[in-house]
Amino acid sequence: GPGIMEAANRGAREGGGKTIGLNIRLPFEQGANPYITEGLHFEFHYFFMRKFWFAYLAKALVIFPGGFGTLDELFEILTLVQTDKLSKQIGVVLYGREYWDQVLTLQPMVEWGAIADHDVGLLRYADSPSDAFEYLRGHLIAHHLEPATEQEAAAPGIAKTRG
């Protein structure tokens, strides 16, 4: 529906990309937005199945201020990353530091021994689209870009498609 998710789908669609919708059936949630690529709209009854597909498909997440559902999705991903249950690196960006600093106070969890100090480093913060983009770009290049083939490596500089 309208809001952050629609804006993400719209931007991707207008940029020529395919978009996906992983909606949950709730009485107070709106329907799918019009920018989801045909055939890539999925509606779930159970939260756990929706979260499974988020984890399965995502290479990175940008989490915007939200409620219990947002926190549920955030902590599911953090738990999977922390316990090495994923076969890939997922970058997690919390957008809007002022909000997240008030909502998430992780240091007491470290002090009580519930999480390790380095677990706090699983999160990155961004206060602007450019901050989020720079982190995501670096993360995706470092963890998800296929190595260059021999042919690509031997190509002249002008023919290279990677940075």
Image: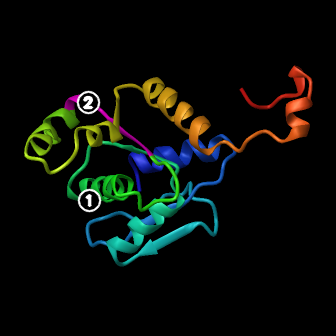
Mark 1, secondary structure of its residue: helix
Q: CA distance from mark 2 to mark 1?
A: 18 Å
- The percent position of residue 23, horizontal first and vertical second, equals 42, 66
Rendered-image quadrant of the N terminus: bottom left
Q: Dot 2: few (<14), some (14–19), or many (≥20) neighbours within 10 Å?
A: some
Which residues lie in the magenta part?
91-98
| Observer-nearest of 108 and 50 | 108
Please tell me whether residue 122 belongs to the stretch shown in magenta.
no
Give me the disc on residue 54: none
Q: Is residue 65 left or right of residue 49?
A: left
Who's the residue at 20% across and 35% down the image? Answer: 99
Amino acid type, residue under disc 1 in the picture: Asp
- Using the rendered view, name the quadrant where residue 116 is placed: top left
Q: Which residue of the protein is positioned furthest toward the top in this rendering? A: 157
Give me the disc on residue 72: 1
Q: Is residue 96 above or below residue 26?
A: above
Tag 2 near tag 1, CB within 8 Å:
no
The residue that disc 2 covers is: 97
Q: Inspect this view and state whether residue 25 appears.
A: no
The dominant secondary structure in magenta is: strand
- Using the rendered view, name the quadrant where residue 145 is placed: top right
Rendered-image quadrant of the C terminus: top right
